[in-house]
């Protein structure tokens, strides 16, 4: 018998290039799937500390695409989205940013994402 959940695959997609970014954002938009993006940097302790929380959110919201972007690895996307501080979280729908949260505040982030997802589910 296989132990369920022992080796859960991450639901967070690490974006490693602008091409990867374009691919996932386009695919999500075509499917009507909302996106939550965590902009991080290896040297930013608060941003790195948010990674387990972001993984947990991804497991809780199966109908949302969760992307992780290291601003030093994918500078073009960070510049395009005007990311100035880490961590920054963007909530996107249909290619547009609908919410932006700056800072490591798990409760605030959870509430905003929950509210956003509920609105989408209601509008169907």
Image: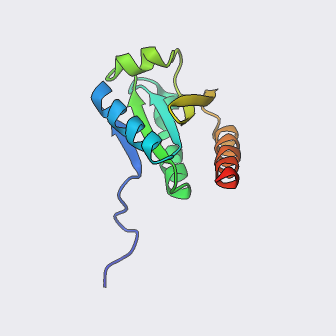
Q: Describe residue 5's horizontal placement relative to residue 97 as left or right.
A: left
Which colour style is shown?
A: rainbow
Residue 17 appears in the figure: no
- Residue sitting nearer the eye, 38 or 1: 38
Which residue is located at x 64 percent, y 39 percent? 109
Q: Is residue 30 above or below residue 75?
A: below
Count of numbered circles on the image: 0
> Percent x, y for residue 52?
48, 46
Q: Describe residue 69's horizontal placement relative to residue 63 as left or right.
A: left
- Residue sitting nearer the eye, 65 or 121: 121
> Percent x, y for residue 53?
53, 46
Which residue is located at x 38 percent, y 53 percent? 10
> What residue occupies the far bottom of the structure in this picture?
1
Q: Is residue 70 above or below residue 52?
A: above
Q: Quick one: quadrant of the N terminus?
A: bottom left
Which residue is located at x 40 percent, y 30 percent? 69
Q: Describe residue 111's horizontal placement relative to residue 76 as left or right.
A: right
Residue 1 appears in the figure: yes
> Percent x, y for residue 86?
51, 23
Which residue is located at x 64 percent, y 54 percent? 124
> Percent x, y for residue 77?
40, 21
Q: Is residue 109 above or below residue 75?
A: below
- Residue sitting nearer the eye, 15 or 104: 15
């Amino acid at each position: 018998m296989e132990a369920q959940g022992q080796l859960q695959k991450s639901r967070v997609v690490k974006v490693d290039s602008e091409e990867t970014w374009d691919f996932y954002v386009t695919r999500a938009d075509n499917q009507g799937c909302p996106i939550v993006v965590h902009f991080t940097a290896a040297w930013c302790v608060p941003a790195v500390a948010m990674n387990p929380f972001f993984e947990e959110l991804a497991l809780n919201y199966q109908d949302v695409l969760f992307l992780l972007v290291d601003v030093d690895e994918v500078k073009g996307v960070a510049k395009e989205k005007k990311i100035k501080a880490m961590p920054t979280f963007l909530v996107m729908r249909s290619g547009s940013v609908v919410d932006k949260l700056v800072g490591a505040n798990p409760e605030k982030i959870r509430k905003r994402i929950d509210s956003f997802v509920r609105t989408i589910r209601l509008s169907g």
